[in-house]
Amino acid sequence: MINSLNMSPIKIRKICCIGAGYVGGPTMSVIADRCPELEIRVVDINKERIAAWNDSDLNKLPIFEPGLDQIISRTRGRNLFFSSEMKKSIFGADMIFISVNTPTKTKGLGAGQASDLSWLEASARQVAKYANGHTIVVEKSTLPVRTAQAIKEILNTANRENQKNKISKTFSVLSNPEFLAEGTAIKDLENPDRVLIGGEDPDAVKALVNIYLNWVPRKQIICTNLWSSELSKLAANAFLAQRISSINSISAFCEATGADIQEVATAIGMDKRIGNQFLCAGPGFGGSCFKKDILNLVYLSGYFGLPEVANYWNQVLLLNTWQQDRIYKIVLEKLFGTVGGKNIAILGFSFKANTNDTRESPAIRIASDLLEEGALLSIYDPKVSFKRIREDLEQFSSNNQGTWKMASSIPDALENVDAVLILTAWDEFFGLDWNSLASLMRSPAWIFDTRSVVNRKDIEDTSLNLWKLGEGN
Ligand code: NAD
Ligand code: UDX
C-alpha cells in the first residue's frame, strides 16, 4: 500500500489511449476535461468509430451517454483528439492506457470462459514497437489476474531488442480498472466511489494518482499491488451480479407465494449491512461485463484448482439465464400456450436505460425465443438502431418462425398487439396513459412488466391484464 504522496519525478504531458470504445472514449473525455494541461490522443483500429467520434454532429457520437456530448464539445480539438494514427500517438506519449475489448474466448483452450486477450496482446506489441523513452502503460481493460505479467514480458522483450540496437525504452505497468456503469458513465467518472491503482513502481503510481487528484479526493484513491487491483475488478462485478441473481431468485419466490418483490427489496435493503443498491429484480443482467467477467472468474478458479469456487460463481450465471427463460415461458403461458401469429410489442432493447448498448441484453434472448415460437414482434427502443437489433437477433437465432419490425414510437409499437413486454426501464415508459394505449391494442391484451414501470392503479379502468415480475397474487 503506497500512502506517501510526494510529487512524482515523472511529469505526464501526453497521454495515448488505445481503444475508443465505451470505456476509452468517456474516460479520456473526462480526463481531458479535468486536466486541460494534458494532451490526450485516443486511437482505434476501427476507422468508422473514429470518424463518428470526430463527427461535427454530436448526435452521431458512437456511443450515447448522458452528458458526454457537452464534454466532447468542450475538449475535442482542444486537448482531446481521436485518430487512427497509432504510431504517432504512441511515440509521443508519456502514459498509455490500454482500453481494448477483452471478450470471452470463442475458440481454443478455455473457450466459452477465459478472456480473449488477443486485442490486448496486439496493443502491447504496438506499444513495445512505437513507444519512446520511459512510458507508463496502464491496464484500463478488465483483465484476468496476473495479466500485467504478460504485458511486462512483451514490453521487456522489446526492451531487450531495443537495447541491442542502442534505443532506450523503458516501461512501468500499472493496473487501473474502470468501474463506470453505462448510462451513468460521466457521473461515475466525475464522481467515482473510488479509483483503484495497482502497481510496483511508486513513481509511476504517483504519476497516475496525480492525474486523478485533479478532481478525485485523495482518500478515494486506493493503491494496491497489481494482482489485488486486477482481482478486485473481477470480484466487484461478480458481487454486483450476484446481488441481481439473488433478488431475481426471490422475485420468483414472491410470484409463487403472494409476496411483493418491491416490498421485500425495501425491507431487506434497509439493513445497512445489506444496503439498498442493486436490488431491482428484472429480466436478468445484461451488458458487456458481468457475464464475461464472471466466466473469467470461473475459469481462473478452475485454473487455480478451486472447483467449488468456480461452481459457486457459475450459479450466478445459471440463475440469470433461468430468469430470462422464465419470463419467456410466462408470456407463452398467459397467451394460452402459443404466440404463433400473435403481435407482441417489445418496449426497450438496450440492456439497461440510458444506453444504446445491447451487448448481452436480456431482450435478445427473450425476443429470439418468441420469434422461434412464431411471434410477430414490433420493437421500440429510443436509442438502439435497427441495424443493431437485426445483427443481435440474427446472431442469436437461426430458426425464426416469426418476424419483427422496428416501431418508431410507443403507440406505433402497440398498434394491434396482443401483448406488450417491457424489458428496459427507459424514463418514457413510466407514467404512460394506458387508457388511451389500450384502445390501440387487441383485447384481451396483456402487459408484461419486467422492470416495474407500470403502476397497477393506472390500468384499473382499462381492459388490460397486467403481469408484474415479482408480484404475487
Ligand atoms: P469496446 O468494444 O466498446 O471498445 C474497445 C475498442 O478497442 C474497440 O473500438 C476496438 O476497435 C478497439 N481496439 C481493439 N484492439 C485494438 C488495437 N490493437 N488497437 C487499437 N484499438 C483497438 O469495449 P469497452 O466496452 O470500451 O470495454 C473495454 C474494456 O473495458 C474491456 O476490458 C471491458 O471489460 C472493460 N470495461 C468495460 C465497461 C463498460 O461498461 N463497457 C466498464 C468497465 C470496464
Ligand atoms: C457494470 C458495473 O456496474 C460497473 O461497475 C462495471 O464497471 C461494468 O459493469 P453496467 O453493466 O454498465 O456496469 O451496468 P449496471 O448498472 O451494473 O447494470 C448491469 C445489468 O444489471 C443491467 O442489465 C441492469 O438492468 C441490471 N440490473 C442492475 C438489475 O437487473 N438490477 C439492479 O438492481 C441493477
Image (spheres, rainbow, N blue to C red):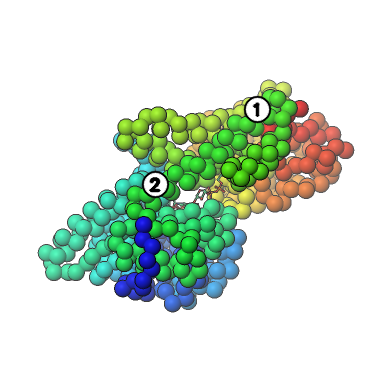
Residue shown at 60%/31% (left/top)? 249
**95 relative to 259, above or below:** below
One can see residue 175 in this view: no
The circle on residue 231 is 2
Viewer-nearest residue: 48 or 186: 186
- Relative to 24, 199 lies left or right: left
Label 1 packing within 10 angstroms: few (<14), some (14-19), many (20+) = some
Q: Position of residue 259 (x, y in %)?
A: 72, 30
* Of callouts 1 and 2, the N-terminal one: 2
Residue shown at 80%/38% (left/top)? 456
Number of callouts: 2
Callout 1–callout 2 Cβ contact below 8 Å? no
CB of mark 2 near ligand 1 (< 8 Å): no
Residue shown at 40%/40% (left/top)? 296
**47 relative to 360, above or below:** below
Q: Position of residue 210 (x, y in %)?
A: 41, 69
Of all residues, the one furthest to the left in this rendering is 164
Which residue corresponds to mark 1?
Answer: 253
Quarter of the picture holding the C terminus? top right
Label 2 packing within 10 angstroms: few (<14), some (14-19), many (20+) = some
- Relative to 334, 157 lies left or right: left
Quarter of the picture holding the N terminus? bottom left
Residue shown at 81%/46% (left/top)? 433
Can you tell which quarter of the image residue 128 is in? bottom left
Q: Distance of mark 1 from mark 2, alpha carbons?
A: 33 Å
Q: Secondary structure at mark 1?
A: helix
- Relative to 190, 206 lies left or right: left
Can you tell which quarter of the image residue 200 is in? bottom left
Can you tell which quarter of the image residue 446 is in? top right
